[in-house]
Image (cartoon, rainbow, N blue to C red):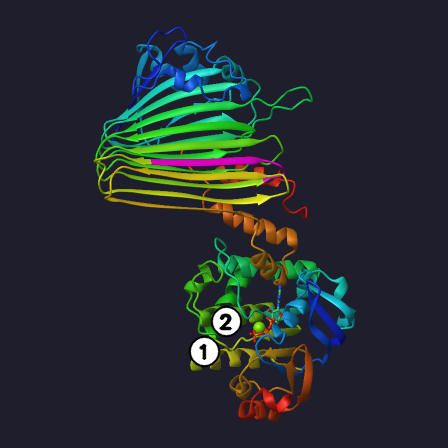
Amino acid sequence: MQKQTTFNFELWRNNDKRRWSRLTNIESTHVIALPTKKIGAQTSSDFCETNDFIEAHVPHLAKQLNHINPSIDTLSITESNPLILDWRNKQASQKSAGQRLYIEAQNGGVCDLIELMPAHLVSPTYRAHEIHVRSGTTLRHWLLEVPNDITQTNDTTPCGALSFRRTLVERNATIERHYLGLGHFSKNIDHTVLTGERAHASVKGLFLPNRSGAEWDIHAHVIHDAPQTTSDNDFRGLASDGGVGIWNSIVTINKGADGSDSKQLNHNIILGQKSQIHTKPELIIFTDDVTASHGCTCGALDEDALFYLRTRGLSKEQAELLLIEAFLAETTPPQPKSLDIDIQAIVRQHRLEHKTIGAGA
Amino acid sequence: MLEIKDAVISVEDTPIIKGLNLSIPAGEVHALMGPNGAGKSTLSKFIAGHEDYTLESGTISFNGEDLSDMDIHERAAAGLFLGFQYPVEIPGVANHYFLKTAINAQRKERGEEELDTAAFLKELKKEMSELKMDPQFKSRPVNVGFSGGEKKRNEILQLALLKPKMAILDESDSGLDIDALQVVAEGVNRLRNQERSFLLITHYQRLLNHIKPDVVHIFADGVIVKSGGFELAQQLEAEGYKAFA
Ligand SMILES: Nc1ncnc2c1ncn2[C@@H]1O[C@H](COP(=O)(O)OP(=O)(O)OP(=O)(O)O)[C@@H](O)[C@H]1O
Ligand SMILES: [Mg+2]
């Protein structure tokens, strides 16, 4: 029998006077102080009502929700029936330019939350999401930027998304996050606190900025606040044609978080003259009894491997693609069983849009 | 089959090969022996088409075609194979996928029909058992974590599958234990025929006891200082390079 896991689902209205964060002491000014200027975020000015939101983004659940208290809703989620938040709906994504969302996963078991976000935005988007993973529960959270067919006209300036995610992970609970960054301009602030013993956070992903002006950004901060907590941050980036990637992983291990273990990894490939990847692991430790490791690399494709493949009959283009495929394969997010979008196919398609690859640059 | 005339080959304006003449007719096995740093690997990578090496003067042709005009993969498809002194590790690419991609890339370049998966796997299985390779090497990433000897054996596997017209084997014997040397030598001998040529780069007569060369060249400081028969390898083994200085 599969355990039923429930989500408590809460959406706040724009005019809600409560402090935005119910999990922590962080004031909303912390969030607003983030560099929103570049994306011109109009913070939560036209936030939609709960019911609109549910209908727009999770229509398959709308029925279930109709008779439930609109401000605090409970959904039953299992692996075979994940919660899919589809932010690609054009109207809805305009309406929800500022989203605040609180989700609670509880009752043990494993549950899947899949967010589908448009890679190209027509209006700036600001998200402040809070997730609470109750003890013994595993939440697998996909954050997938999916290509959308918005035809870019000359006068549309590309818009960005600023996402702030705050996660609390209790005793024996796990958050497992998989990012896929294909977005034109996307800044992600991912803040996780491991509050109970043996809580685990895994924050992994792949980002592929592939044009000049594209910038994909992750600042992931994990705070170990209890003994024997573990965290694993592993990102890969491929920047090409002037795209920019930023990886910043911060791990804080607080006093009393003895026996904690953290890993921080970031490997990147940079193709094309103007492409950049900034990589910065940070580790702040207040206790001695910890294991921490980190490593990052940035570089072009391995020349020796390219030569080797070419002497075996692969053209330069084929050899480059094979090496890139191999590089990407290791961190392409796993495919959730219940999702009808093929993640590998999206990555493959996006890769083909990298102009410098296979063009001999 | 391979004709090199008065070749001067340089790396970043420093000449490494300084006027080399080498002619290997079809069906012959030539051995190239020379001290460390003489330029043997440079020569072999240059022949394969490595872009770091420039032909300053002289000519190089393969089956009558000027090699300078051909890209690396075109040389491979034309039948040139290089067994690396240091085979390269390629993480994330399964060995069998790599082998099949290589075979079919060459076939396509030559305008031949591609090999289907079933036929390829059958051939792969056969060649691996001939070379006494454990089946696990089929799916492991190319050369990653292979021991020195296992890497060399994997080179011979590629040679056996790609069936080139001419194979340059750069120290395929170094790092091999006695039994492995036997297996590799048998692999080469099995492929020897009237059309196929070999250039064996080696430091030791030992390999040549197993694979009898038609010609032995002594190579030092970028030129061939002496060519002869198997007796040259024996002389070298007995007296060292000072005999050829
Ligand atoms: N890319 C390069 N850049 C600079 N120097 C190089 C390069 N390639 C080769 N050389 C130099 O050319 C010389 C010949 O090197 P090579 O590897 O061809 O020697 P070798 O005869 O194969 O030696 P060994 O028996 O040790 O394998 C060496 O002095 C080497 O340092
Ligand atoms: Mg060498």
* Residue identified by numbered label 1: B180
x%, y% of residue A246? 50, 35
Q: Which mark is residue A239?
A: none
Mark 1 surroundings within 10 Å by alpha-carbon count, few (fewer than 14), some (14 through 19), many (20 or more)? some
Question: Is B67 included in the stretch rendered in magenta?
Answer: no
Residue type for callout 1: Ala
| Tag 1 subunit | B
Q: Residue shown at 67%/58% (left/top)?
A: B108
**As drawn, A236 above or below A107:** below
**As drawn, A203 above or below B215:** above
Q: CA distance from mark 1 to mark 2?
A: 9 Å
| B75, B132: nearer the viewer | B75
Question: Is A250 included in the stretch rendered in magenta?
Answer: yes
Q: Which of the 4 quarters of the picture holds residue B4? A: bottom right
Residue A339 seen in the current view: no
Mark 2 surroundings within 10 Å by alpha-carbon count, few (fewer than 14), some (14 through 19), many (20 or more)? many
Secondary structure of residue under mark 2: helix
Q: Residue shown at 46%/21% (left/top)?
A: A34
A310 with respect to B123 (left or right): right
| A352, B50: nearer the viewer | B50
* Residue identified by numbered label 2: B152
x%, y% of residue A100? 40, 16
Looking at the rendering, the stretch of residues picked out in magenta corresponds to: A240-251
A130 with respect to A269 (left or right): left
Q: Quadrant of the N terminus of chain A?
A: top left
Q: Residue shown at 54%/93% (left/top)?
A: B238
Residue type for callout 2: Lys
x%, y% of residue A145? 50, 30
Magenta region, main secondary structure: strand
A347 with respect to A231 (left or right): right
First along the sequence among labels 1 and 2: 2
Badge 1 and badge 2 both on one subunit: yes
